[in-house]
Image: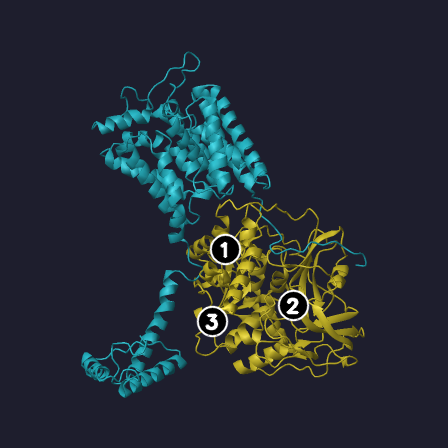
Chain colours: A cyan, B yellow
Amino acid sequence: MTKETKMTVSASPHIRSASTTTGIMLDVIVALIPALIVAVVIFGYRVLAVCGVTVGTAMLSEYIARKVMKRPGTLGDLSAVVTGLILAFNLPVSIPLWMAAIGSVVAIIVVKQFFGGIGQNFVNPALMGRIVLFVSFPSAMTNWVKALSWKTDAVTAASPLAVINNMFSNGDIAGAGEPGLPTLADMFFGVREGCLGEISAFALIMGGLYLLVRRVIHPAIPVTYIGTVAVFMLIAGKGSLTFTAYQIMGGGLLLGAIFMATDYATSPMNLKGKIVFGIGCGLLTAVIRLFGSMPEGVSFSIIIMNILSPHIERITSPKPFGADKDNGKKRTGKPRRRRARRYEKLEFKIPADACRRSVRGLPCLDVPSGVHQQHHGAENRAAGEGQRAGGPPRAAARSERLQETRSAAKRRNLRIL
Amino acid sequence: MKTIKTPGVLKAVASAVGGVPVMHNKNTADKATVRMPAPERAVIAMLQHIGAPCVPTVKPGDIVGVGQVVGDSERIVSAPVHASISGKVASVGEITLPNGVVTRAVTIESDGEMRLFEGITPPAVRNKDDLIKALRASGLVGLGGAGFPTHVKLNIPPAKKVTTLIINAAECEPYITTDYRECVENARDLLSGVFTVKELLGLENAIIAIEDNKPKAFEILRNTAAAEFGSKSGVKLMALKSRYPQGAEKVLIRSATGKSVPPGKLPADVGCVVMNACSVAFVARYLETGKPLVSRTLTVDGSAIADPKNVRVPIGTKIADVLAFCGGFKEEPFKILMGGPMMGLALADTELPILKQNNAILAFAGGTLRTKRERDCIRCGRCAFVCPMNLVPTKIMNLAKAKDAEKLENCPAEVCMECGSCAYACPSGIPLVQYLRLAKTLKTEAGDNS
């Protein structure tokens, strides 16, 4: 080696896995495609226009926001595309395109970039965009176009979930074949009214399985979320499986549980946290659906759990290797006992005239109250005789003795209670 | 000898504990160890172990033989260093080790004879104390990479009830095949070392743990044990799931015995002592010949190496000489590593000497190591999922970035063993190990100041 070489020196590890942020986002996009195809079939080509607007606006917002903030561009990680697509999936197909654009701007600029960009947003951007639109334009956001009516004459209809929940508040448990309700098979494959991406349970589950196989998402959140809703609905529906099935496939539960509650930035990282998060989402969704004023509660429940997520994570964060419960018990048990024994040994060194009250800032030691009265009685008498300034001789001696005990204890690294 | 498989439960535990499925890349597995001829000069560093550095015991102009002590220390946690070639001491100077530590070093100019030092005789070892003394004299340190003096490790206080000797032949780092070759080529030494250490320390059982991607090592050890040692009880062979970092001490103990070593504790606290396969085989050879640790096996591999091989080199040989012995570079190297790709140190200088604890020199051509642009954390949790120590690396990173000494106080950053699983798995290409090191440094500084 006579020639000078240019070598890279960096911290280990020197090899990296193949997974990248862009790859993960691309996987999410791939997983959303089946639902997109179903949406186009059921609601027509306007679906593509809505998606195009949300994705385009999202990317433009991301680009402008990063430029204005003088931060490196992040368009390449494709997260803006995912946000745009998921937002579109949460909108009715009939939404005016400018409204869809506003949703994207809110999602990317206000929710994501204002808080520091990818990974920093405290709630799911797409969901927050949807909620802002829902609150601002309630009628446009609940204008459901009848499934497959786009080729002839687009007509509007009530969403299946609204039908079921209305019946529930009237005291009826809906079953299959109710007027105004699609069949369960239609629900499964997506021939129904609703937001454009939420309609097909089949397509969403396929996407979810793809994400699981690619290890992009962990099953904990979707399983606990959907499971909790199912259990709740079974109980509320007095054991009616049909009712439960409509509840699971209706509304945005599957879309929310698979694609939105699993958002990395806004859900807990550890397994325990994910389970708590999923159950929380499930309970809130079920409660809002059955007892709230709105027919659907997926967005709000996920947003609420997003906000709670850091707290859940703090409580459930894992203990380092070897410091888990069983080991902890064995480890902490012994020293505690030893410390207790030390106190016992120390006890007979306590001066007999120690008392409960503090003497010159030093707390007194614990001794029977008789001693206490006796000595403070003497102290009080001394004070009464006007000798307080110099300090009564007995009190001074006592305080000295105490000091000795304390310093002796300190030398031996013991603590006096 | 009994062969045991990792029980299913433990396997599940092991995979739950984390780790990453790295590529094995054991390209040199079938290459028999080649002995490298004496180099022209050898640089014996005074610090080739964890602990106190040695003080040179020779001066320029001295004639030394192979195995002669050239540096020793009074301190307990230390190991003497020996001349690895015979010849004349050219100088006693200073060198900067790859990890940045500056230490003294003795440079020996070879006379080309590799003449053994006269005083070398096999040590008489009858009990534990003899063994500890002999091991200290041998200069043996953990050959797996850490370099902890073996005589200190095996000198277990009687208060700690150690029952199990675990031989680490997991070799989970990609590329490296030195432990594997030791098992294949020197199975007899290895087993005899295991029996000796186990008997002299009075341990109840010994487990030789190998990752299940090395069935040949497994078979050879089993056959050798059957042929040479009969049915001596208490030694078991265990196949571990191949998953990095299976060979990390605490992970290995968990996989082999199901016990977890609590943070800040030693393996002895859970009744185990772990030795590397090469180290334990050296013990047997040393007790037979009395020749101290003067050479070791290295894997030389990587995309830039012309002729990858396993090579036995005198300690103190310049890395450049070892590379030249392996045909030099076939491509311009982009990174040269001392150790494996997961935990090894990147070298800036190939003039540095081989140390006792080095087990590989890897050189990679540009473009053959995947690099990722560092992006913002997306909180995907992969780092936490793969961390074998159950840490949340990204959180510790944030604290380190914020220099939040107060919160770092309560975070167990020092538990991190820098295995690199987190940074390997990170899709955002964040150098998490670097941030964890920063966190540890900040913590130590905060501790020193208060």
Chain identity of mark 1: B
Q: Is residue A262 visible?
A: yes
Q: Residues within 10 Å of mark 1 (few under 14, many from 20)?
A: many
| Separation of residues labelled 2 and 1 (CA atoms) | 27 Å
Residues tagged 3 and 2 counted as in contact (Cβ below 8 A): no
Of the image marks 3 and 1, the number of the one nearer the N terminus: 3
Q: Is residue B406 left or right of residue A193?
A: right
Chain identity of mark 3: B
Q: Is residue B243 visible?
A: no
| Separation of residues labelled 3 and 1 (CA atoms) | 32 Å
Pointer 3 and pointer 2 on the same chain: yes
Q: Is the N terminus of chain A in the top left, top right, bottom left or bottom right quadrant?
A: bottom right
Q: Which mark is residue A53?
A: none
Chain identity of mark 2: B
Q: Is residue A192 left or right of residue A19?
A: left
Instruction: Please state which of residues A290 and A390 is positioned toward the viewer in this rendering.
Output: A390
Q: Mark 3 highlights which residue?
A: B268
For residue A32, above or below residue B148? above
Q: Residues within 10 Å of mark 3 (few under 14, many from 20)?
A: many
Pointer 3 and pointer 1 on the same chain: yes
For residue B377, above or below residue A379? above
Q: Is the C terminus of chain A in the top left, top right, bottom left or bottom right quadrant?
A: bottom left
What's under tag 2, amino acid-wise?
Val
Residue B38 in which image quadrant = bottom right
Q: Mark 2 highlights which residue?
A: B101
Q: Which mark is residue B399?
A: 1
Residue A298 screen position, x and y as percent? 36, 34
